[in-house]
Amino acid sequence: MGLSTGGDTRRGATLLPTRQIRGRGRPVPFPATLDRTMRDDYEFVILGAGCSGLSLCYHLLESGVDAPILILDRKTSFEDDRTWCFWDVEYTPFTHLARKEWSSWSFASETGSVTQTTEHYPYKYLAGRDFYGHVLDRLAGSPNVTVRLGEEVGGYAEESNGVRIGTSAGRVLAGCVFDGRSLSPGSIAFEEARRRSVWVPQEFLGRHIRAGRDVFDPGRCTLMDFSVDQSRGLRFAYALPTGEREALVENVYLSEAGLSSQAHRGEIGTYLEDAYGLTPGEYEVVGEERGYIPMTDHRFPRRLGERVHSIGMLGGETRPSTGYTFLRIQRYCRELAGAIAAGSEPPARVHPRHLDLLDGIFLRFMRERPGECPEVYRKMFAGVPPDALVRFLTERSTPLDEARLIRALPKKPFLVLAAGALLECVTGGRT
């Protein structure tokens, strides 16, 4: 999902027609025309058929690129295994696929709750199944695109005439490589980022619930409910009702809680009973998703070589202070595809540089003062006008929006953390 302070992640309401949760457990149909025999060489090879890899290929086609493109991924199918949420602050080619939207959202903690309504920026819910199906259909209509699933990438090396990639199906030469594989725990990039940065993990498990009676308010979603037990670490619940009887409910930790899936499920069950009066026998689980999102101010390299670029989480497209990734991916892939089509230099970044300091301060606050976070978030949601808050959370804020945010936050702890962050930058204490 992405932290509920910007879901991008962070709800009444102008609503889209409610649709039943469907297809959970069934793979997304894979067009046979995409599974073409591999050539010896391609102009572009994309590693990873996730959100960033598929989005880049989609934007390349929309930009008029007709050179041969190969997408490689070790997975063997596209499962309906994830959800992306984002505020509708700008056009994306996937916004119309949203199954649901909310213009009102709520926040809760032990000290109170806040409900806000926006007139301009609804919060969108995009199911993985719908995204995958739409992109695959677009790619299937382009004879220059090949997608090979079940292919292991052993590594790559730059040569004078391209990048030589070793796969389980053989070697292939690429004019340019875009590495969009996930930032997975245990990988070199993951461990380096954790060691060299301010690091706050976001661990979550979500369950798609279908209740036997009307209990949910489909006109409002819950972005962050910190009123849940905090004994295992900083934690909140997140609920996206898609109908009076259906919702995605997530259990989210902003700490290395290390909970098993069963423990997450137990805490979701407790939340459903406490918040909605639902006992286990009154609902069924029709789908589940689990994730680990590193929230870090690590400067991920955009170029991994002369002809190798990183995209997605590996390219730093996760917002450090919120965990939201979807809009950043769309912005970067759109700009990158446009640069490639125009024969110009790929962009190094598309998000505002001046927000890096604020993101770093928020990260430090979550890491060093987790017990104070629920009240700080409550003040932020209560004290900042909803449209201004949305613009900040989606990196579209004005100086006035940022001034309103700063005014709503406690000054002393954030000034201390800001001083530390600035000192670190000046002294080069962290690279």
Image (tube, rainbow, N blue to C red):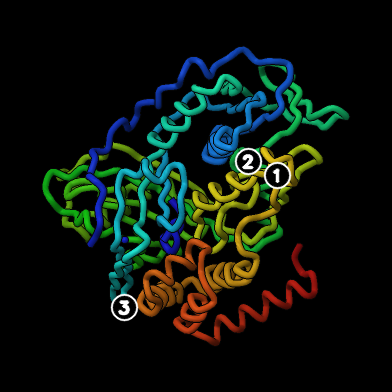
* For residue 419, side relative to residue 203 (left or right): right
Whichever of labels 2 and 3 marks the residue nearer the N terminus, that label is 3
Give the amino acid type for the residue marked by disc 3 in the picture. Thr
Q: Residues within 10 Å of mark 1 (few under 14, many from 20)?
A: few
Could you tell me which residue is drawn at 78 percent across and 75 percent down?
Answer: 426
Q: Nearer the viewer, mark 2 or mark 3?
A: 2
Q: CA distance from mark 2 to mark 1?
A: 27 Å
Q: Secondary structure at mark 1?
A: helix
Image position, residue 114 (x, y; %): 30, 73
Against 359, residue 403 (above or below) is below
Q: CA distance from mark 2 to mark 3?
A: 47 Å
The image quadrant that residue 390 belongs to is: bottom left
Q: Secondary structure at mark 3?
A: loop
Could you tell me which residue is drawn at 31 percent across and 61 percent down?
Answer: 11
Please identify the residue farthest to the top as the structure is shown. Answer: 37
Image position, residue 164 (x, y; %): 78, 26
Count how many numbered circles sit on residues in the image: 3
Check residue 188 in the rendering and tell me which mark sits there, or answer none: 1
Residue designated by label 2: 337
Whichever of labels 3 and 1 marks the residue nearer the N terminus, that label is 3
Against 424, residue 395 (above or below) is above
Give the amino acid type for the residue marked by disc 1 in the picture. Ile
Whichever of labels 2 and 1 marks the residue nearer the N terminus, that label is 1
Q: Residues within 10 Å of mark 3 (few under 14, many from 20)?
A: few
Q: Is 125 in front, or is 331? A: 331
The image quadrant that residue 353 belongs to is: bottom right
Residue designated by label 3: 111
Q: Nearer the viewer, mark 2 or mark 1?
A: 2
